[in-house]
Image: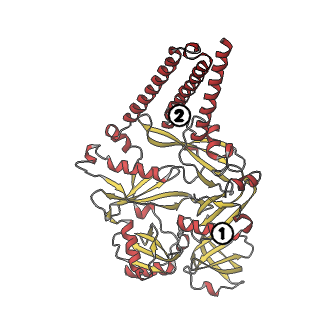
Amino acid sequence: MKDKKISSIIQRILLSAVLIFLVFYTTLPAINLRDRSFIIFLMISIAIILFVNFLSYMKVFLEGLNQGGIHGFHGISGADIARPVKYGLGLIVILAAFYCVASLAGLKLFNASRYRDLITINEGSFTEDISEISMSQIPVVDKDTASRLGNRKLGEMTELVSQFEIEEDYTQINYQGAPYRVTPLAYADPIKWLFNMQEGLPAYITVDMVSQETNLVWLESGMKYSPSEYFFRNIYRYLRFSYPTKMFDIVSFEIDDNGTPYWVAPTIAYRVGWWDGKDISGAVLVNAVTGESQYYPKEEVPQWIDQLYDSDLIISQLDDNGLFQHGYFNSIFGQKDVRRTTYGYNYLAMDDDVYLYTGMSSVTADQSNIGFVLVNLRTKDTTFYTVPGATEYSAMESAQGQVQHLQYTATFPLLLNISNRPTYFISLKDQAGLVKMYAFVDVEQYQIVGTGTTIDEAKRAYREALNLEEPEAEAAVGSEEMSGTISDIKDVVISGNTFYYFMLAGDDTVYSASITVSEQLPFIQPGDTVSFLYTPDTLPAEVVEWK
């Protein structure tokens, strides 16, 4: 009888362990008391143990009935059943109480100032901080357009399209000084995974947000770790078993300056109460090909990482900062100085970083902004610019109104500096989602709109609407002077704009000049001597002034 009881205990332990492991394997909570999911996992685990014990006791009870009726049942006592139920339910009640108390400790009612201080906002000067960029550097591709371009590119590859599809991440990054969106391939279904898992995912997609050039970048060795993998090579499961106690935010796909694919997994730290006031403490970088990983504190994250902070997290912190300027009750009753973000955001590429841009509006004014903020998505450095004017959606409606006969739809605007005026730049798309026109809308006077089939045409129309003369070319900060003899020159059309690519004799550098730089460019021939200013930090080197 003793051996049978020991065997029954071992069976219960093994069955409970298997079921608990399957729950953990599926839900992947961090083994950390500051993770809500872990507390729920513990309660489910206790319930599993109680259920397995109950099934075991029922089995013994039924065996006793079969052997001699109710009088022949000697396997268990009432205490054997009641004791684990008592302790198990007691532990569940304790965990549930802990969950409730921990949640109450993070209520905004008691912590308004702590939520407000999750993000620090500095004041900035628009004309000093936001420099006017070349028209050839304006990104015209949003996520939807990037997705369409990526799908079209994959469709051209007949050997891939039957086996793979494209992840819809399209992370915006700065790659070699230019704004790009990047996303990996994914296995089309479990059968395709089975046939391709040994080689891994062979490529990823890059979309140049300025030229709309879309490339399928082949890898020497395929990516073995991704969300479309199964079992322990699934990136979420791989991270959990490699870093069991860390809490992860949204995992994103990026490439380093050499084009090596990585998964960026930001780690969560809670700043309010027990598990509220979510913030980022660092990141785990996983090489998507080899699986090599390393944790970096936030201050040591490599420069090439562009999106450590999720945009929705930043928007949430900005809203809390604006809501609780003077405490919780002021956010409801007096609403003095209370502000919120507008209903959307976009990205700006500056200084080899990606910045989130969104407008800020008073809670009592739906149709106007009091200013806007730029947030560095790697460092969370945040700057507010006081620029009163129309909201982004008002500007979008104004741009659509200019071409209402064409029924184009506007993308969410970018905020640019045009002749020291805050200006919304908007792409206008047809029903197929293709960019057909461009618009510049004045922030302060959103009825002033310039549209065109090219960016330069739209800018000229905008300046005419403002009664501004075309400025003389000014030397960009950090530009250098160059002169020499043209050895080769070619012209190309990118997004409706003409560019000239040329090289000088004895110089391997490729230079790029927009037609707007000089009307002499169409007549330049190999052998001509030229002199110009250019920016050496771009690829190719961009000509900013023709001498």
Q: Nearer the viewer, residue 402 or 102?
A: 102
Question: What is the three-letter code of the residue carrying label 1?
Answer: Lys
Return the residue at label 2: 41
Determine whether the residue tagged by mark 2 lies in a helix, strand or loop: helix
Query: What residue type is disc 2 on?
Result: Phe
- Nearer the observer, disc 2 or disc 1? 2
Upstream in the sequence, badge 2 or badge 1?
2
Q: Mark 1 points at which residue?
A: 153
Along the line of sight, the residue nearer the viewer: 155 or 111 = 155
Asked if residue 39 is positioned above or below residue 487 in the image, the reply reads: above
Along the line of sight, which residue is nearer the eye, 186 or 114?
186
| Coordinates of residue 325 in the picture (x, y in percent) | 31, 47
In space, the residues marked 2 and 1 are separated at their CA atoms by 43 Å
Residue drawn 65% across and 24% down?
11
Q: Report the side of 457 relative to 148 (left or right).
A: left
Crowd band around label 2 with a 10 angstrom C-alpha radius: few (<14), some (14–19), many (20+): many
Q: Quadrant of the C terminus?
A: bottom right
Q: Can residue 417 be seen in this view?
A: yes
Q: Position of residue 143 (x, y in %)?
A: 54, 64
Q: Quadrant of residue 404?
A: bottom left
Q: Is residue 26 above or below residue 456?
A: above
